[in-house]
Image (spheres, rainbow, N blue to C red):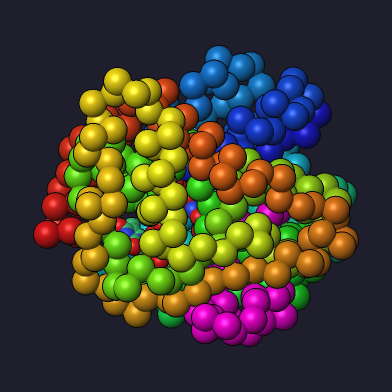
Amino acid sequence: MKTYLVTGGAGFIGSNYIHYMFRKYGDSIRILNVDALTYAGNLENLKGVEERENYTFIRADICDKEAITKIFAENDIDRVVHFAAESHVDRSIRNPEVFVQTNVMGTAVMLNCAKAAWELPDGSFKEDKKFLHVSTDEVYGSLEEDGGYFYETTPYAPRSPYSASKASSDMLVKAYMDTYHFPANITNCSNNYGPYQFPEKLIPLIINNALQGKKLPVYGDGKNVRDWLYVEDHAKAIDMVQEKGRLFETYNVGGHNEKQNIEIVKMIIETLREMLPENDERRAHITEDLITYVEDRKGHDRRYAIAPDKIRQEIGWEPETMFKEGIRRTIEWYFDHEDWMKNVTSGDYQKYYEEMYS
Ligand code: NAD
Ligand code: TYD
């Protein structure tokens, strides 16, 4: 039975990944979820897996070397899947330091502890141990509107404090692979959407605001492009890269699903109106009149677009969820989880929202 150490498993993608893995492997794997439970981490995301005997939650900070060393000492870890990070660009612009701390220093601790636990006296590594570092396409910088795609060979050119910290963490993983032959992979994925996403990010923020009849803030001219991927397709890609990919390789993960932000906002309005029952009074206020153009993000990257050729050709992964279907599933999930939304948007979120959009 393989033992997985998943960091950041109480966040958006991490929790979706854990659900996916238990659906796929059932009782034949064990997962330890290590998460500090920052504002973005929520144990409610793991309802349904918490009672499993092959699942353990450990509250720990990935920067805490002692705590992480202890976890490796007490468990024979076979796979590390490293999601834990500060993940929101706007927050990184307001407060970059915590991004350096968690994303760079935290990754250094994770690498160091895995290396210490897996290394043999001759400098080689125990058999079948693997570390997967989950990263972003934002490390490649910003593309022009008609300016091609991000490939694994595209030079790094991060432009926000978030992407700079992720690029630094990727470089550390690459350094471990080159220097020590440390058994790892990196995945660089495009924007994800789906259940359990914290409503500071575009799609859940727009769904939540629209349902409440609040303004829908669109940065700048609304024509920035992101390449959206349904989160479950990302979870599947991570598992396939770890099990079928070539060690030491980077794989780009994306959906060939480029959309301007304004298109996304209009599509959410349209889909909400289609999905709400005729007699639901919220239908009346969910119109394009809610759209409000606001000041642009500082240094706003114009376009991201992944070329997922390598992962398709080498591993056979392809995105499976069409955007129209994925958005409907996502909205359905938010309809069914009003309490989740209420809980995560109380307290600190209100303060953040007021400061950010004032
Ligand atoms: P998230 O913000 O929803 O979740 C991050 C999780 O990490 C939270 O549970 C949080 O509590 C935990 N965490 C933060 N700091 C920690 C620390 N010091 N120690 C332990 N745990 C800590 O993020 P997400 O959107 O799920 O992203 C997960 C990973 O995927 C990140 O590495 C991110 O860079 C990457 N990624 C995200 C996207 C996207 O669209 N969201 C796209 C590509 C890559
Ligand atoms: P976001 O979800 O923060 O992801 P990222 O910045 O990592 O791509 O933002 C997606 C796009 O939506 C980005 O171009 C910024 C834009 N955006 C808005 O226009 N309004 C908003 O309120 C937010 C949160 C984002």
- Look at the image and say whether residue 87 sits in the magenta stretch: no
Which x, y percent locates residue 15?
53, 36
Q: Is residue 19 among what the camera can see?
A: yes
288 with respect to 198 (left or right): left
Image vertical order of residue 344 relative to residue 357, above or below: above
Residue bounds of the magenta highlight: 130-157
Frontmost residue, 56 versus 49: 49
| On-image quarter of the C terminus | bottom left
Q: Residue furthest front?
A: 278
Frontmost residue, 312 versus 3: 312
User: Residue at image x 37%, y 75%?
Assistant: 300
Image vertical order of residue 181 relative to residue 149, above or below: above
Which x, y percent locates residue 122?
85, 63
10 with respect to 300 (left or right): right
146 with respect to 240 (left or right): left
Main secondary structure along the magenta-highlighted residues: loop
User: Residue at image x 59%, y 52%?
Assistant: 229
User: Residue at image x 19%, y 44%?
Assistant: 214
User: Residue at image x 57%, y 83%?
Assistant: 146
Q: Is residue 82 among what the camera can see?
A: no
- Look at the image and say whether residue 151 sits in the magenta stretch: yes
Which x, y percent locates residue 301?
43, 76
Which x, y percent locates residue 109?
54, 58
Q: Quadrant of residue 257?
A: bottom right
